[in-house]
Amino acid sequence: MSRGPQWLLAFIAALIMLGSGFTAGVAVERSSVLPGSQHVEPSDLSEQFSIFWQAWDLAQRHFVDRSAIDPKEMTYGAIEGMLQTLGDTGHTRFMNPEETAYQSSDISGQFFGVGAELNLKDGYPVIVAPMDDSPAEKAGVKAGDILVEVDGQSVVGMTLDRVVRMVRGPEGTQVTLKVIHDGENSVTEIAITRGKIQVLPVTWTMVPGTDIGHLRLSQFNANASKDMASALTQLKAAGAKALVVDVRSNTGGLLDQCIEVTSQFIPNGYVLMERDADGNQRGLSVNAGGQATDIPIVVLVNQGTASAAEILAGAIQDHQRGQVVGETTFGTGTVLSTFRLSDGSALLLGTSEWLTPNGRQIWKQGIVPDVKIDLPADAKLMTPRLLSEMTPDQVHSSGDPQLLKALELLGQR
């Protein structure tokens, strides 16, 4: 065996020696520390890697562009290819050290970029949702957009993290995206100036002319449960008799935050079920003491509702705490265990999946709303900030049929 393969075997062995980790989803969906994994070499390691070494050696010896031969990049590419064969497209994946650092900044609630959540669907990069008041939303990026080019370079077939790395960049710089809006056939070019993305997980307002509170939850980041508790206290003081809980275009976040937030609306029982690769199931229970366990609620969802937000919607349905209105959600349901590797990179592996309290599958199925209402392509999703500046008549002519249906179901016509 040549020196190249021997070096790579040692490098791969070092990478596979997994340390502590945390579980994650579309963003990060569980923060508990997992025990370190002991690496055990399979007895037939040399046989399994024989073809790989042959390919490595041939590339090392014969590829014409000698400057392109980078052992680290070739190793990362090999790991990415291995994980892609598992079929958990857009979820189970490899992240290099830079991408791992990006993920950590995301869940802290602050980073630089355009403010849109990406995932892979049917092999294409898709905008799960733009964040509220983000550069992406202001520029016209919409949930369901298929991303085809970034700054003139095709991203079709690229890994998710590579696409994210291309879209991100320093504050004040510009990136040009070419997208296909959902339901359209033509390509739209959108120029966006990158900015500092500060995620406010919870915002609220009283719907003008009603005693209904509009409670918007945009992400389950580290501040979500604290901000939710504060918002509910203020809504009660403002005289709210019912709530619209809006998780449209909410792409998820920390699982412990999801459990705490959902527990504000459900008195007891399970928030979700977790099933591992062996079929073993365990329930994750409601935390007692929720502030809004008996107030009437309607939950709003759309195709950008994903991951932890789908858990909340599914739990509301299964506990019959209120109706879910909108579009079938994205369908993210594997629990990602994130294992840190020795060089600062990480493996995100789907080690189990989430189910609703009644055992319904979320992964690839999504949550089907009780009342299906599509949001027209040209409609603007109403947020508490926008509603707070409206008159009652303006609310009812706002062009947000999902919100208007929620108000109707809560007794406001």
Image (spheres, helix red, strand yellow):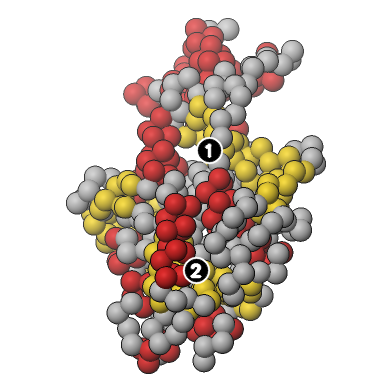
In three-dimensional space, the C-alpha distance between marks 1 and 2, rounded to whole angstroms, equals 24 Å
Disc 2 is placed on an element classified as strand
Q: What residue is rendered at 39% in x and 60% in y?
A: 131
Mark 2 is surrounded, within 10 Å at the Cα level, by few (under 14), some (14 to 19) or many (20 or more) other residues, namely many
Q: Nearer the viewer, residue 239 or 203?
A: 239
Is 316 situated left or right of 392 in this image?
right
Name the one closer to the observer, 342 or 241: 241
From what the image shows, is residue 239 above or below residue 314? below
- Residue 242, given in percent of the width and then of the height, sits at 53, 76
Q: Earlier in the sequence, mark 1 or mark 2?
A: 1
Q: Residue at x 54, y 55 (%)?
A: 261
Vertical placement of residue 322 versus 40, above or below = below
Give, as a three-letter code, the residue at label 2: Asp
In the image, is 255 to the left or to the right of 188?
A: right
* Quarter of the N terminus within the rendering: top right
Q: Which residue is mark 1?
A: 31
* Figure quadrant of residue 319: bottom right
- Examine the image and state in which quarter residue 45 appears: top right
Pinpoint residue 306: horizontal percent, then vertical percent.
55, 58
Q: Which residue is mark 2?
A: 246
Q: Is residue 322 left or right of residue 386?
A: right
Crowding at mark 1 (Cα within 10 Å: few <14, some 14-19, many 20+): some
Front one among 57 and 38: 38
Q: Residue furthest left?
A: 172
